[in-house]
Amino acid sequence: MLYRNHAGDKPKVDASATIHPSAVVIGNVHIGQKVFVGPNAVIRADEPCSEGKVEAIVIEAEANIQDGVIIHALGGSPVRIGKGASLAHGSVVHGPCEVGENCFIGFKSVVFKATLGKGVVIQHQSLVEGVSIADGRHVPSMTGVLTEADSQRLHPVSAELAAFADKVRRTNVLLAEVA
């Protein structure tokens, strides 16, 4: 379901994107080519800043927003989900936030007030808050990354994890194409 926000902004969805009928997309949301938005996902660009403006949530081409994902933002702050990024079941991305190209955010992980470089892999049930993570870094399952020191200690993504993230991306692009 696509809804306008209080300011009258309505989602802009590329014709090649697939949004499940149970997903809810509200307001100043831009969804790119071959994006897949799964069942019960919620994408809300509806909370204004003090001047009343609502910044966009931008989901770039070939990203996938899986079942039960929530994307929202504090008081008019922007959110960008980079090309080919995968947000796995039940994850939360709360802005202000920047998710780089080909990132993977695992089941029930939370990313808040953070910037993720290209190819970052966050495994399941992790918390990333208030930090920047460099390109190609790995956040293990059930890990908190809450300081820049935590971020600096992260190891590079293994070839196996990078291949897994790419397989998830390709599978979900296929879902967008066949729906």
Image: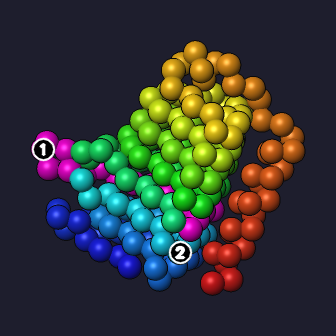
Q: Is residue 22 above or below residue 36?
A: below
Whole-number angstrom distance, CA of label 1 to CA of label 2: 33 Å
Q: Is residue 16 above or below residue 99?
A: below
On the question of residue 94 being in view, the answer is yes
Count the numbered circles shown: 2
Residue at 60% x, 46% y is: 125
Residue at 79% x, 59% y is: 167
Q: Residue furthest right?
A: 160
Q: Is residue 99 above or below residue 8?
A: above
Residue range of the region highlighted in magenta in the rendering? 48-67
Does residue 49 show up magenta in the picture?
yes
- On the image, the x and y values in percent for residue 38 come to 56, 72
| Quarter of the picture holding the N terminus | bottom left
Q: Residue furthest left?
A: 51
- On the image, the x and y values in percent for residue 120 come to 67, 39
Colour treatment of the image: rainbow
In the drawing, what numbered circle is on residue 109?
none
Q: Callout 2: helix, strand or loop?
A: loop
Amino acid on which disc 2 is placed: Pro
Q: Is residue 139 above or below residue 17?
A: above
- Residue marked by disc 1: 51
SS assignment for the magenta stretch, majority: loop
- Residue marked by disc 2: 39
Q: Are marks 1 and 2 in contact (CB under 8 Å)?
A: no
- On the image, the x and y values in percent for residue 64 come to 60, 62
Tell me which corner region of the image, top left, top right, bottom left or bottom right, holds residue 100: top right
